[in-house]
Amino acid sequence: MTPILTPTYCAAVHIGASHASMIVISLMPDGKEEIIDFLEKNIPLGRDIFRHRQIQSSTIEQAVSVVRGFQDALEELGLGAIPLRAVTTNTLTEATNADVFLNRLQISSGWRFIPLDNGEMTTLVFLKTRRRLKDTPSMRKRNTIVAHVGPGNTRLLLFRHGQVVRYQSYRLGTHRTWEQLHSPDLLGEPILRLAREQISGMIAQIFFDFAREEIEDLVMIGTEMQMLSPFLSKPNKTKSRYKVLRKITNEIASVTEQERVRKYGLDYQTAGSVIPALIINLAIAESFNLTSLRVSCSDYEKGLLNDLARPSSLQEELKNQTLHSACVIAERYDVDLKHATHVAKLSGKLFVELRELHQLEDDDALLLEIAALLHEVGNHISPKSHEIHSQYIVQHSEIFGLSDHNRLLVALITRYHRKSTPSLNHEIYRDLDSTDRIRVAKLSSLIRLADALERTHSQRVIDLSVEINAGKAQLNLVGPIDATAERLALPSKADLFQELFGLTVVLHES
């Protein structure tokens, strides 16, 4: 008798700049999944944020009503208690009353909405773009720049041989640009000229940043561009041309919002923002003299919600991309990569051997590995107090795949890899909650030990194991016949570990 497979369910809600949407997904034990429900409602959040710098009370109440409607839909499906992730656009943080908006939603619905930060948003763009490698084989061969033009920011991911080698975020977006124009009634050449003047500074910066990368292709992602995909490429195809993009841009700019809605299947929330979306992508293509363009024909919002609702099947690849991004940054600052990668290897080994002691999660292991790869970037500024310079560089670098918060934790771990240990006298560390402070302290104690074992920068310690008994943590080292150099480095490096865990660290050559 064939066993009955029982599905599990998950859901996600996203309040974006133009729309609020919810997806409900059924997941089968055999890996099959199905979208049970998808709801979408217009909300003028982006208009309020970039026009008024705050969310109007009418918009807040509209959002509350929409969210309650989503809850009713879940109840009708008998799924009111399923796991659900609730997020908002990252541009919400630019509203002066963002906390009022979030509190109102939580009190009225019981759902806690979290604004997506730039790091996670870029990760979501990657997950979406990564799927394009299947229908866009050229991305594995050509230097391809992926442009996600969002409501407040434009994110550029550079793919080389199918791998992300660089990414950058710019304060250049559809709603930000449209509301700054203050000329929604202009049509044709005047509105195109005004918009180009508005974005010219950022476009020049983009060209400066990527001019040496030999860009060969452009993939356009975003709500507006994917709604226009039927007019930019053939059915079920991704390929487009610069001249097609320019033609559509001129046509849409020449007609009223009502005509854009009717002729191009847009809604009134995107009928204005579609012009900056087109012009920004057009300007990027022109900057790099590109004629070959790509546009995804999938539903942008459904794809976003799908990745929010469930753990991605691409998590391992995402981790590898994040580590690759850290290596690229390390190379940019002339780090001794042999030393850095070996400290990362030893840190990882200590993390595994001491797991029962530190009780940290796999995500913390990734933060430790990234910090190890980047712990000496500060030498690029000065060897003196380089740990402080490392913190600054990491804190202000774009590390692909890391949220802003996790990047801050990595910066602190690099700060504490030598000399002073975490202290409440240090402002950034003090501002963390107690859980994150102990995470930083534990991970810093491990990287300090690993750095001591790589004191000679010669990768002498090939492997290690750990034995704990009688108040001691004995590190059994595989490799060096005489670990005198490592022992000399230990007193100034093992202090934090002993303070946290109450164990004296001793070395033993195996």
Image (cartoon, rainbow, N blue to C red):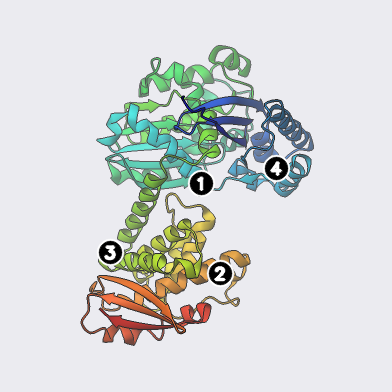
- In the image, which disc is placed on residue 111? 4
Say which residue label 1 marks. Answer: 120
Res 427 seen here: yes
Q: Earlier in the sequence, mark 3 or mark 1?
A: 1
Q: Secondary structure at mark 3?
A: helix
Tell me which amino acid carries mark 4.
Trp
**Which residue is at a point 40% across and 60% down the rendered structure image?**
370
- 187 or 58: nearer the viewer: 58
Q: Position of residue 363 (x, y in %)?
A: 47, 56
Disc number lying in front (1 or 2): 2
Instruction: Please tell me which residue is depicted at 37% across the width and 19% down the height of the picture.
Output: 237
Numbered label tally? 4
Q: Position of residue 202 (x, y in %)?
A: 47, 43
Q: CA distance from mark 2 to mark 4?
A: 28 Å
Relative side of 319 to 83, left or right: left
Q: Mark 4 or mark 3, which is nearer the start of the sequence?
A: 4
The type of residue carrying mark 3 is Leu
Q: Give the mark nearest the N terminus, 2 or 4.
A: 4
Q: CA distance from mark 3 to mark 1?
A: 27 Å
Left or right? Give the position of 206 relative to 424.
left
Instruction: State how far apart marks 1 and 2 are (Cα).
Output: 23 Å
Using the image, tell me which numbered label, if any, was put on residue 438. 2
Image quarter of residue 71: top right
